Amino acid sequence: MSSPNYQAMTEQELRDYVRRNPEDEDAFQHYLSIIRSRPGVICTTDEEADAQMQRRVASITDRD
């Protein structure tokens, strides 16, 4: 069986593939390289993004 072409996948497709195939280390590392290449990235997981969003919303609410 041939391995998928990670470069041809959209980011969403690759993320979905990694979630369905957590044992595919090459796919996981390629996905991480995409995430890390973004400027100003402070979150690398959905959970971190949710937590960051909650902190930002709370800080805005606290100022009001």
Image: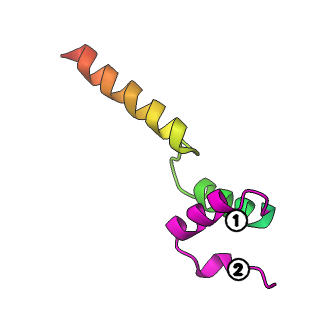
Query: Residue 37 or 35: which is nearer the viewer?
Result: 35
Spatial CA span between label 2 and label 1: 12 Å
Residue that badge 1 annotates = 30
State the residue at coordinates (79%, 61%).
25
Query: Residue 7 or 42: which is nearer the viewer?
Result: 7
Q: Is residue 47 above or below residue 14?
A: above
Name which residue type carries label 1: His
Residue 14: within the magenta? Answer: yes
Q: Residue 53's quadrant in the figure? A: top left
Q: Is residue 51 above or below residue 22?
A: above
Query: Residue 25 or 33: which is nearer the viewer?
Result: 25
Residue, far bottom: 2
Here the colouring is rainbow
Q: The residue tagged with tag 1: helix, strand or loop? A: helix
Q: The residue tagged with tag 2: helix, strand or loop? A: loop
Q: Which mark is drawn over residue 2?
A: none
Name which residue type carries label 2: Pro
Name the image quarter holding the C terminus.
Answer: top left
Residue that badge 2 annotates = 4
Residue 25: within the magenta? Answer: no
State the residue at coordinates (54%, 42%).
43
Magenta region, residue range: 1-24
Q: Residues within 10 Å of mark 1 (few under 14, many from 20)?
A: some
The picture places residue 61, in percent across and down from the top left corner, at 24, 20
Q: Residues within 10 Å of mark 2 (few under 14, many from 20)?
A: few
* Label located before the other in sequence (2 or 1): 2
Q: Residue 8's quadrant in the figure? A: bottom right
State the residue at coordinates (54%, 70%).
13
Left or right side of 49 for 14: right
State the residue at coordinates (33%, 21%).
58
